[in-house]
């Protein structure tokens, strides 16, 4: 069985390092993007099982990227879990996110939500 692939769109390098370590320990394959990468193009190229994306990326809006993903027929069905330090869960879900985590979150909560989202 191949590993579940997580595409990570997060602009905080410390958070990226922590998430990569955690997710790999849990058996996921992790592809971390740079803050200014084209997330939609990366989803097309990497074909992840789930995208974990921050709402506030350095030069991009995670919500705008979510809109692009949901509006692109070839990648619209890829599950997306959003995260933010701001209370924007309702907006994320309304715009098509499959899940939301408020930062800071516990590692167990992340793993549980990713597994639920992938199996949904």
Image (cartoon, grey):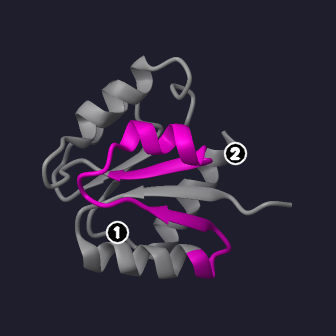
> Residue at coordinates 14% horizontally, 55% vertically from top-left?
58
Question: Looking at the image, which is closer to me, 109 or 9?
Answer: 9
Position of residue 8 measured from the top left corner of the image (x, y, whole percent): 42, 58
Where, by quadrant of the figure, is residue 30 drawn?
A: bottom right
Look at 25% across and 35% down and name the residue there.
Answer: 63
Judging depth in this view, the residue of 29 and 103 nearest the camera is: 29
Residue 49 lies in magenta, yes or no? yes
Q: Residue at x 24, y 47 (%)?
A: 55
Q: Residue at x 70, y 45 (%)?
A: 119
Q: Secondary structure at mark 2?
A: helix
Please name the residue that numbered disc 1 is placed on.
105
From the viewer's perspective, tell me whether residue 42 is left or right of residue 55: right
Q: Quadrant of residue 29?
A: bottom right
Total marks drawn?
2
On screen, residue 53 versus residue 13, left or right, reads right
Q: Residues within 10 Å of mark 2 (few under 14, many from 20)?
A: few
Give percent across and percent down for residue 53: 36, 51
Look at the image and say whether residue 114 sits in the magenta stretch.
no
> Can the viewer see residue 90?
no
Return the x and y of residue 16 as percentages of the image width and height.
Answer: 35, 72
What segment is highlighted magenta in the picture? 24-53
Q: For mark 2, what is the residue?
A: 119
Query: Could you classify mark 1 by the number of other residues whose Cα lies within 10 Å: few (under 14), some (14-19), or many (20 or more)?
Result: few
């Amino acid at each position: 069985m191949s590993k579940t692939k997580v595409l990570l769109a997060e602009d905080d390098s410390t958070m990226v390092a922590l998430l990569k370590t955690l997710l790999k320990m849990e058996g996921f394959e992790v592809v971390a993007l740079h803050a200014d990468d084209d997330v939609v193009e990366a989803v097309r190229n990497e074909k992840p099982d789930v995208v974990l994306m921050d709402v506030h990326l350095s030069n991009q809006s995670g919500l705008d990227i979510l809109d692009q993903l949901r509006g692109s027929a070839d990648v619209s069905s890829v599950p997306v879990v959003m995260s933010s330090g701001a209370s924007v869960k309702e907006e994320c879900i309304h715009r098509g996110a499959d899940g939301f985590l408020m930062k800071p979150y516990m590692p167990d909560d992340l793993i549980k939500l990713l597994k639920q989202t992938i199996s949904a």
